[in-house]
């Protein structure tokens, strides 16, 4: 069985690459823009018809949240039109798609962890293009599986973890937003969850349960709490001050609350989800190594 991974050089794609050898009986096709430009629909169609993947994991996304506010055309192309096209291909080839989405589809006004059926109402261009991508994918292929995640970090690429380590070592003090609450997600854990779903489906095709799912690590924190935990684990002496969203304005509006309820993915696929601080310690130990 072949597994096509798009956006393979990003945080999640890189983590999938590092774990691929642990899953026997699967041949992985790792592609990023240099190997397969997803905006060239004809090239993608020909590639998939030639390789005939059994699964497509779409990790590719336009994730420059603030830039998207003035670059909506490219964000729409990558976040909305590409998933729709992959859905069209998967439908025609009879393969399965796992598409990665975001907590930004919610407005952040809830006070309870979001379940998959809660009202979606994104406040940013990024969030709107990702939501439209979900809708467009399902319209093309109702058997698709969508996983919304939040606050992704990894040993790969640029992310909040690496930024806080760098700034904490360079400065005596930092200001970090304390009124946006969610859950950090170690990309390695999400990669394991996705590969577990594929492995279970390979062993038993009826294990595949299409639909929308939520995945983040367990627990809840603010960006301020996240920064403090990073410095504590890294033994970085830096005075971190909590500030409000109003004190740190950005072009794109962030959800004030985006904690995700993971009951559905745990129930349907038996996925085990680590506590965010435990995963953070593991990721930092790998960074140090």
Image (cartoon, helix red, strand yellow):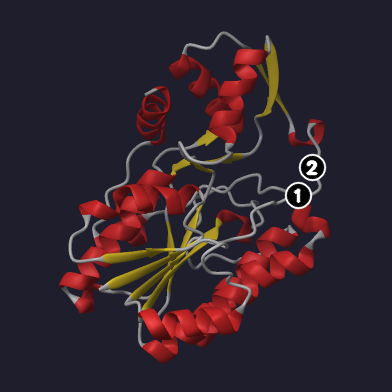
Sort mark 2 into few (<14), some (14-19) or many (20+) by Cα contacts within 10 Å: few
User: Relative to the observer, which residue lies in front, 164 or 106?
Assistant: 164
Among numbered discs 1 and 2, the one appearing first in the sequence: 1
Dot 1 lies on which element?
A: loop
Q: Are marks 1 and 2 in contact (CB under 8 Å)?
A: yes
Kindly identify which residue carries mark 1: 66
Residue placed furthest toward the bottom = 92
User: Relative to the observer, which residue lies in front, 138 or 286?
Assistant: 286
Q: Quadrant of the N terminus?
A: bottom left
| Residue 20 to residue 223: above or below | below
Q: Please give the name of the residue rendered at 46% of the width and 39% of the height, measured from the top-left corner.
A: 154
Return the x and y of residue 278 as percentages of the image width and height.
35, 30
Would you identify the image quadrant in which residue 197 lies? bottom left
Q: Is residue 141 visible?
A: no
Q: Please give the name of the residue rendered at 56% of the width and 8% of the height, measured from the top-left corner.
A: 237
Dot 2 lies on which element?
A: loop
| Residue 15 to residue 284: above or below | below
Kindly identify which residue carries mark 2: 250
User: Taking 244 as reference, is 186 left or right?
Assistant: left
Q: Quadrant of the C terminus?
A: top left
Return the x and y of residue 206 as percentages of the image width and height.
22, 79
Q: Please give the name of the residue rendered at 51% of the width and 51% of the height, measured from the top-left corner.
A: 10
User: Relative to the observer, which residue lies in front, 50 or 112?
Assistant: 50
Q: Is residue 49 visible?
A: yes
Return the x and y of residue 19 as percentages of the image width and height.
30, 49
Return the x and y of residue 45 as percentages of the image width and height.
51, 84
Tag nearer the camera, 1 or 2 = 1
User: Relative to the observer, which residue lies in front, 230 or 217?
Assistant: 230
User: Taking 140 as reference, is 219 left or right?
Assistant: left
Report how far apart the C-alphas of labels 1 and 2 lie in the structure. 7 Å
Sort mark 1 into few (<14), some (14-19) or many (20+) by Cα contacts within 10 Å: some
| Residue 198 to residue 113: above or below | below
């Amino acid at each position: 069985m072949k597994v096509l991974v798009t956006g393979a050089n990003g945080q999640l794609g890189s983590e999938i690459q590092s774990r691929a050898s642990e899953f026997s009986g699967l041949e992985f096709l790792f592609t990023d823009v240099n190997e397969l430009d997803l905006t060239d629909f004809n090239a993608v169609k020909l590639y998939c018809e030639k390789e005939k993947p059994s699964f497509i994991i779409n990790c590719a996304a336009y994730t420059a949240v603030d830039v998207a506010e003035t670059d909506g055309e490219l964000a729409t192309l990558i976040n909305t039109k590409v998933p729709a096209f992959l859905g069209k291909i998967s439908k025609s080839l009879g393969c399965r798609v796992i598409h990665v989405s975001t907590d930004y589809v919610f407005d952040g006004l809830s006070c309870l962890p979001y379940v998959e059926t809660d009202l979606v109402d994104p406040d940013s261009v990024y969030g709107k293009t990702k939501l439209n991508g979900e809708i467009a994918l399902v319209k093309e292929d109702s058997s698709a599986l969508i996983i919304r995640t939040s606050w992704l970090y990894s040993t790969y690429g640029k992310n909040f973890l690496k930024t806080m380590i760098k700034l904490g070592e360079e400065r005596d003090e930092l200001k970090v937003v304390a009124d946006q609450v969610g859950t950090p997600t170690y990309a390695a854990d999400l990669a394991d969850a996705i590969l577990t779903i594929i492995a279970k489906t390979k062993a038993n095709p009826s294990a595949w349960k299409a639909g929308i799912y939520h995945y983040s690590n367990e627990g809840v924190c603010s960006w301020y709490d996240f920064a403090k935990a990073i410095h504590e684990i890294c033994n970085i002496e830096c005075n971190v001050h909590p500030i409000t969203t109003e004190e740190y304005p950005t072009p794109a509006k962030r959800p004030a609350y985006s904690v995700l309820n993971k009951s559905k993915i745990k129930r349907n696929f038996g996925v085990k989800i680590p506590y965010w601080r435990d995963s953070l310690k593991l990721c930092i130990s790998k960074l140090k190594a």
